[in-house]
Amino acid sequence: MDGEGSLVTQSASLPEPLLKELCDLLGAHHVSVDPHELEWAAMDFTGGYRLGRTGQRARRPLAVVRPGDVEDVRQLVVWAARHRIPLVPRGGGTGVMGSAVPQLPAVVVDLTRLDDIVVHPDDMLAEAGAGATLAAVDAALRRHGLALAHDPWSVGIATVGGAIGTDGVGYLAGRWGSMGQQVVAIEAVLPDGQVVRTRPVPKPPAGPDLRALFAGSQGTLGIVTRAWIQAIGAPEVMLFRSYRFRGFEPGFEAVRALWRAGVIPDLLDFTDDYPAAVELPPGYEDDLGRTGLLHLGFFGAAEEARGRLAAADRIVKRFDARDLGEEPAREFWERRHEIAEQFALPILQARDARRRWQQGAFDYINLALPASQVIPYRREALARIAADPRFYAGETGLWGRPEVFSLLVSAAHPAAAQAAGGAAGAGSAGAGGPESTGVGAASADEPGPWAAEWTPEDAAAMEQLMHDLMRMAQARGGNMECLHGTGLKLLPLLQDEFGPALDVIRKIKRALDPLDLMNPGKWGETAGAPASDGGVAPPDGSGGRDGVVVVRGGSGGGSGSVEADRRGDGGRSPGAAGDPVAPRSGREGDPAGEPGARPAGNGDGGATAGSARGRRAADATAAMPGNGRWRTGRAFHPGWFTRA
């Protein structure tokens, strides 16, 4: 990475006749081929470092389109099938796994215009377009004494469709489940242009549950355009309590005891780290020098919430918990969205792809493990991290329920250690986590000390470490990711995750999408869609055809080398034009250019004064918030990204 934006350095242009068709279909003002817009739509909030080598598969889209209703989407899908052009649905772009990142030249379908909301108070349902933000849905429900139970960190930016596509998990998931579990009915456009709607009742009809089929599908089976979401009653009271434990294990046992007793909090966040990292004084740590901090919240009718809180207080104190009162948990709750408000939102408003790409040298995992395996897995993971002096373990913890385990890994960079005053935590995790270093967030022009001497070899070692940690979880019967979807980042581990079930997923995909035009490649199927006459093929030569212009390197303003792609079809020949089951190429796409190449669409003369002002405004953001304990001017805490 050269600090200029992203690794997305290769793109293809949409032939003028097809661009005109798109403009006629949706209106010219709802179709964009602006280089900066394409660069923005080529990535989500994963960040370049975390994508690792899979980031080389990313491609700039051919265009970004913004349909206004389900009929627009239907016509767009029919158009795409006719020309064999992949489509990648996109919501708010707040994903952190690369689920909305194109792997082929594709048209990105920005669904944010589908933002209407209708509340059905008697049915306790919110009917919302796929582009409605979660915050807008909640605000509409609140006017009727109801509330939305899906509350991720990005609630003000993330959309209904994106949350369904990744089956996202929010702060209230322990009691109310993931987004997919809260969806009562969906409307979706299938790859053949058919519009399907399920009935808005809690129990689906006899047979397979189509709602569950689309939850977590990442837009690979069709485009969800509308959803009916189960609402909950707005709480009469919101009660909070925080507790401190002597390390992770007693805190984990306390959480497990809550579930065994059926005392389910609305909010549960448990963090294990060094005392300074969680802003607690020393003196109550385990043998590794780590302390545990548990935040609980009980929301609802006064009598019911107070009863659950009283039961929880009695249970957790059996595990030598120190009662910290209500203020820490209340403050955590009130600040839970600041990562989006202070970091993501300014970048989003400025469309600053460069800053979005730049993140420090850290990574994290969010696993679902059998409860019996959480403690042994954590011990094994900390030992694996400690075996490599280039890394140290930051926070570990639980989120929502006892099976959902998160872990942060950072680079043991000398500058970070120096900023921490050279203090190293005792035990296997090494130096204190980055939240205790005082190291500020990287600006768009200064990558910061974590990245200052971070080499490609270091990045490859981090990627290998994370893969090892996830395979260790799989070996213990767990899932490698349970909050954000698998996206682009976890493609190398799909076979390990699903085993023979991966072929079942691919068969469903082929049955619904025989041309593989819906967000292709996200289930590890070979990249490279066949192109009929007039279509667009990938620039790697798989299914290639004359007339596709490929731009490599350059600034996206025409200064890079441009050549017509006239290579072969990359293997198996496609079927006859119009054949809906034309076979795919048998090869993967080529990497997207040199990692150090300057991306198109950054720094060229096409930037508007407004966008430049927006980027400067985003750069001026002082710091990214830290794991719910952030104060103005505090250093960025990467552990925020372990929260959905």
Image (cartoon, helix red, strand yellow):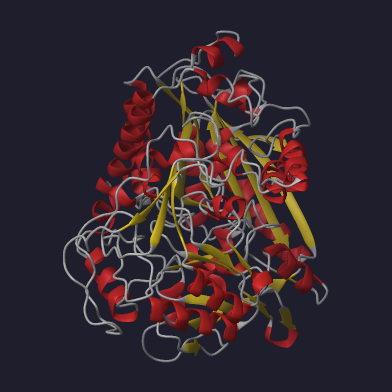
Q: Is residue 241 above or below residue 506?
A: above
- Looking at the rendering, which quadrant does residue 549 occupy? bottom left
Residue 280 in view in this figure: yes
- Looking at the rendering, which quadrant does residue 183 occupy? bottom right
Side of 86 where 117 appears, left or right = right
Residue 320 in view in this figure: no
Q: Nearer the viewer, residue 304 or 183?
A: 183
* Residue at (56% x, 72% y) in the render: 182
Image spot of residue 357 (x, y percent): 55, 40
Side of 507 where 241 appears, left or right = right
Q: Nearer the viewer, residue 550 or 371?
A: 550
Image spot of residue 451 (x, y percent): 51, 23
Image spot of residue 282 (x, y percent): 62, 18
Image spot of residue 594 (x, y percent): 37, 36
Q: Is residue 572 above or below residue 274?
A: below
Q: Is residue 40 above or below residue 66?
A: above
* Residue at (75% x, 36% y) in the render: 616
Side of 470 where 321 appears, left or right = right
* Residue at (49% x, 88% y) in the render: 195
